[in-house]
Image (cartoon, rainbow, N blue to C red):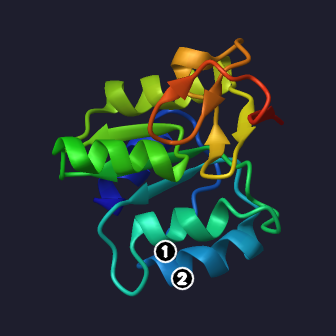
Amino acid sequence: MRTILRTMLQSFGARKIVEAEDGASGLEAMDRANPDILILDWVMPILDGADMVRMIRTQNNPYAYIPIIMVTAHTERSRIIEARKLGIHELLCKPISAKSLYQRIASIILQPRDFVKTAGYFGPAPREVRGHKKNWDGNSMIGEANSATMV
């Protein structure tokens, strides 16, 4: 999968691509490479993609606001809901096409999203609430504007 992603990214004109074999190595590579975007597989050894995102989306992490695309072969509803709660920008289901990857990257670049911080969620504002002062708790939107902070 990494070879396929690398080839696609190179065809898009990406110049610096850093790979890691697992989530733990990925966290170490982030400190060395200072990435602009992360593309993670949900299933990785040592530290899976979901745990890696949880570690990144902490306020003390210098990469807390980095755009994240999660790649997965698991497309059941519960996994998609969990991905949303994790605070990723885009979910890309396997098999991956160059077009779908390009569209996700373009969406992140051309339609940047504010980040939302609530008691139960830290990540990009869901598309449904972008530009609105609604709360996001990772499960649903509610109309009380005071407990969500757009950052």
Q: Secondary structure at mark 1?
A: loop
Camera-nearest residue between 88 and 85: 85
What x and y, as percent, mark residue 57? 66, 59
Name the amino acid, label 1.
Answer: Ala
Neighbor class of circle 1 (other Cα within 10 Å; few <14, some 14-19, many 20+) is some
Name the residue rendered at 52%, 70% in the picture: 52
What x and y, as percent, mark residue 135? 65, 28
> Residue 89: which numbered mark, if any?
none
Residue topped by disc 2:
25
Name the amino acid, label 2.
Answer: Ser
How far apart marks 2 and 1 lie (CA) works out to 6 Å
- Tag 1 or tag 2, which sits nearer the N-term? 1
Viewport quadrant of the C terminus: top right
Neighbor class of circle 2 (other Cα within 10 Å; few <14, some 14-19, many 20+) is some
Name the residue rendered at 34%, 27% in the picture: 100
Name the residue rendered at 74%, 34% in the picture: 148
| Residue lying at the far top of the rendered structure | 131
Residues marked 2 and 1 touching at CB (< 8 Å): yes
Give the side of residue 122 with respect to residue 45, left or right.
right
Vertical order, 123 against 109 (above or below) = below
Camera-nearest residue between 85 and 49: 85
Name the residue rendered at 49%, 43% in the picture: 10
Vertical order, 38 against 60 (above or below) = above
Q: Secondary structure at mark 2?
A: helix
| Quarter of the figure with residue 147 | top right
Viewport quadrant of the N terminus: bottom left
Residue 31 visible in rendering:
yes
Residue topped by disc 1:
20
Residue 106 visible in rendering:
no
What x and y, as percent, mark residue 138? 51, 42
